[in-house]
Amino acid sequence: MKMTKKNIFDSVVFIIVLSLFLYFYFGTQRRHDLLTNGPVSYTIGEITELERGAKVTPWFTYKFHINSNEYEGAYGLAKKPYLSVQLNDSLIDYIGRKYLVKYSLQNIKFHELDLDKPVPDSLINCFKCNWNKPPF
């Protein structure tokens, strides 16, 4: 079989698409496994921004601290359909609120904000607190 430019191009595109699919599939699976079954810790995260895309569901940007290092994450509002349809004014009220953040001890880049766990007033100023299990 003679390799034409089209065949080479099609093969390269196929390999790239397959590689991206496998990377995201196994990356998502690994993230889920580490946050579900691996050693995790908890801290407090603060919502800092509301972002809206032209054709995507809005998301919150949040920050949290681990050992004097600041990290940032994003929480897609598609996870909470009742929030994704709200107007900007009601969503902007979330900026500055604090919620529990769960993160993997094996790979800190795997973390998630829990909008169902608002931080109680007694812990609101505990920016660098970390727990092995949810404190509330």
Image (cartoon, rainbow, N blue to C red):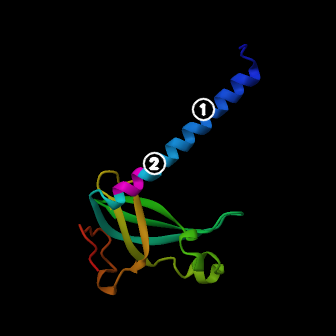
Check residue 132 in the rendering and tell me which mark sits there, or answer none. Answer: none
Q: Is residue 84 left or right of residue 44?
A: right
Residue 80 in the image: state x and y as whole percent: 54, 75
Residue located farthest toward the front when viewing the structure as drawn: 1
Instruction: Looking at the picture, tell me which residue is in the foreground, 104 or 5.
Output: 5
- Name the residue type under label 1: Ile
**With respect to residue 3, does 56 lie above or below?**
below
Is label 2 in a helix, a strand or a loop?
Answer: helix
User: Residue at coordinates 34% horizontally, 61% vertically from top-left?
Assistant: 36
Question: Is residue 78 in the magenta section?
Answer: no
User: Residue 78, how many percent across, how many down?
Assistant: 58, 69
Name the residue rendered at 51%, 76% in the picture.
95
33 magenta-colored: yes
Q: Would you name the residue on which mark 1 appears?
A: 15
* Mark 1 vs 2, N-terminal side: 1
Q: Is residue 23 above or below residue 51?
A: above
Above or below 62: residue 71:
above
Magenta stretch?
30-34
Q: Amino acid at mark 2?
A: Gly
